[in-house]
Image (cartoon, rainbow, N blue to C red):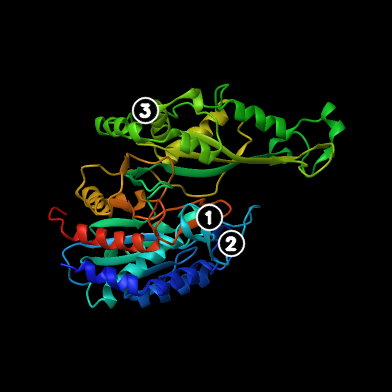
């Protein structure tokens, strides 16, 4: 049995070094959508994983960005696959108070010392905190209580499109794992620990129409707006197509068959929803998102059920013609719409895309092109009664925090790629600590202690506790 008291003392002794490790990594850009610094970040992470005690560290090449891989086999009966990501979104949004790649620590109320940087919470901070944890275990003269397989991908922000290639290449090593663990910061801004048991799937695509493929309207460039009197508009054509896909509120999808495979919440889900509604802080969520009301003015269980168990068809962005300052009358020749679908049990990526194609064709819009930007992936779920979920909950309970269990989240992560055959892995997500504003200006991770949430040290201690609790499971 690992002596966690010794590990905690080692963490406290090396805390400044642990902060330095974190700063070093967030200061290395790894912006996968813009291909900025990604390979340099992978090389740095491989070095850091080796320095933490992982062996056989290497870059597993894919058709895209490499996966950083490492192993630490200590002969334990349980093997944990630690899956994480080293890539980030861009940081070109207005409103940053610091250079997003400078990794500055500032005092932020009510949290205290806080790291502000792109990737601070999503997910370079938790990633480095886990490596710090393993390093502290080794430097305390001990071994982790479980065998570890480490896999950090560089394309999560691109939809993990080459992760299946990595899984095929390393299938024999990955099959040794009993469970997948995704390190994260689970505490909300008030210190409550949020345990999530699942994710929705996602597929991201573009609809595009231009006059040339349509055979009507301008074919090569935008023309003077006065020509609308006798020339068709691809932009209006797309607007009409989009309007057939949802009802007048925009909230009910009218694509034929879209809801056919949607599984209603189970009895376990409904029980979790009822408990969640008792502690869910609706007003805090609305204030954080700067929204005044939910769809249909829903509250409580009804709002949570719609949020967590309803598939969505979303317009992420659309553009056509002139969008600069001032006026310029123009009849544009092309319009592009970025869209995503969030998939719930039992929806499938390929069938959903086929339904959208069929809908457009049936309604007379066969000229609209669908371009997949990501391969997409499915939903994944865990039961609250899973021994791994119970191990995670027992670890959290040691930190004397309120715990709130969510049957799933409305967001997406590629856990289904590991949960599906050939690996069939159960999964756990999280850890103590708090951060926020992922994908937004001033993304942050709490470093210091003493505020309403745990800091970096608490996060690292929670990771050690999770390893310990998983190691004691008998029914894996």
The reply to whether callout 1 and callout 2 are in contact (CB within 8 Å) is: yes
Q: Secondary structure at mark 1?
A: loop
Please state the horizontal and vertical placement of residue 90, each as a whole percent of the image: 58, 57
- Which of marks 3 and 2 precedes in the sequence? 2
Residue at the far left in the pictured view: 474
**Visible in this render: residue 67?**
yes
State the separation of the CA atoms marked 1 and 3: 30 Å
The reply to whether callout 2 and callout 3 are in contact (CB within 8 Å) is: no
Q: Secondary structure at mark 2?
A: loop
- Which of marks 2 and 1 precedes in the sequence? 2
Q: Which residue is mark 3?
A: 301
The label shown at residue 443 is: 1
- Which of marks 3 and 1 precedes in the sequence? 3
Q: In the rendered view, would you say 305 is above or below 369?
A: above
Q: Residue at x 57, y 57 (%)?
A: 33
Quarter of the image for residue 55 reads: bottom left
């Amino acid at each position: 049995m690992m002596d966690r008291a010794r590990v905690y003392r080692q963490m406290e002794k090396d805390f400044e070094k642990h902060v330095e490790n974190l700063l070093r990594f967030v200061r290395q850009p790894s912006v996968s959508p813009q291909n900025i610094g990604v390979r340099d970040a992978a090389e740095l992470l491989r070095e850091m994983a080796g320095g933490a005690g992982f062996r056989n560290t290497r870059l597993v090449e894919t058709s895209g960005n490499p996966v950083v891989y490492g192993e630490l086999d200590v002969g334990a009966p349980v093997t944990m696959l630690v899956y994480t990501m080293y890539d980030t979104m861009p940081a070109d949004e207005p409103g940053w108070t610091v250079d997003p790649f400078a990794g500055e620590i500032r005092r932020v109320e009510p949290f205290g010392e806080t790291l502000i940087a792109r990737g601070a919470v999503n997910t370079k901070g938790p990633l480095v905190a886990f490596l710090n944890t393993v390093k502290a275990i080794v430097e305390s003269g001990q071994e982790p209580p479980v065998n570890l397989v480490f896999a950090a991908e560089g394309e999560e922000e691109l939809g993990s499109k080459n992760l299946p290639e990595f899984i095929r290449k390393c299938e024999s090593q990955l099959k040794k794992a009993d469970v997948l663990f995704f390190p994260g910061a689970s505490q909300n801004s008030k210190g409550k620990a949020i345990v999530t048991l699942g994710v929705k799937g996602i597929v991201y695509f573009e609809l595009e129409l231009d006059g040339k493929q349509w055979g009507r309207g301008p074919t090569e460039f935008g023309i003077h707006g006065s020509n609308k009197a006798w020339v068709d508009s691809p932009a209006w054509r797309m607007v009409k197509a989009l309007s057939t896909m949802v009802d007048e509120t925009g909230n009910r999808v009218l694509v034929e068959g879209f809801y056919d495979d949607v599984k209603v919440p189970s009895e376990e889900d409904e029980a979790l929803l009822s408990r969640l509604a008792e502690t869910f802080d609706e007003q805090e969520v609305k204030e954080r998102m700067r929204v005044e009301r939910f769809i249909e003015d829903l509250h409580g269980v009804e709002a949570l059920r719609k949020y967590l168990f309803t598939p969505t068809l979303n317009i992420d962005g659309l553009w056509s013609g002139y969008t600069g300052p001032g006026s310029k009358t123009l009849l544009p020749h092309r319009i592009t719409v970025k869209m995503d679908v969030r998939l719930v049990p039992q929806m499938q990526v390929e069938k959903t895309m086929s339904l959208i194609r069929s809908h457009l064709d049936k309604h007379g819009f066969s000229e609209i092109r669908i371009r997949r930007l990501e391969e997409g992936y499915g939903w994944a779920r865990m039961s609250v009664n899973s021994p791994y979920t119970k191990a995670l909950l027992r670890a959290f309970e040691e930190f004397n925090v309120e715990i709130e269990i969510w049957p799933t989240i409305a967001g997406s992560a590629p856990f289904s790629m590991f949960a599906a055959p050939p690996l069939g892995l159960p999964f756990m997500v999280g850890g103590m600590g708090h951060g926020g504003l992922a994908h937004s200006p001033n993304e942050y991770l709490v470093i210091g202690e003493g505020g309403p949430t745990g800091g970096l040290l608490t996060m690292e201690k929670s990771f050690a506790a999770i390893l310990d609790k998983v190691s004691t499971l008998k029914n894996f």
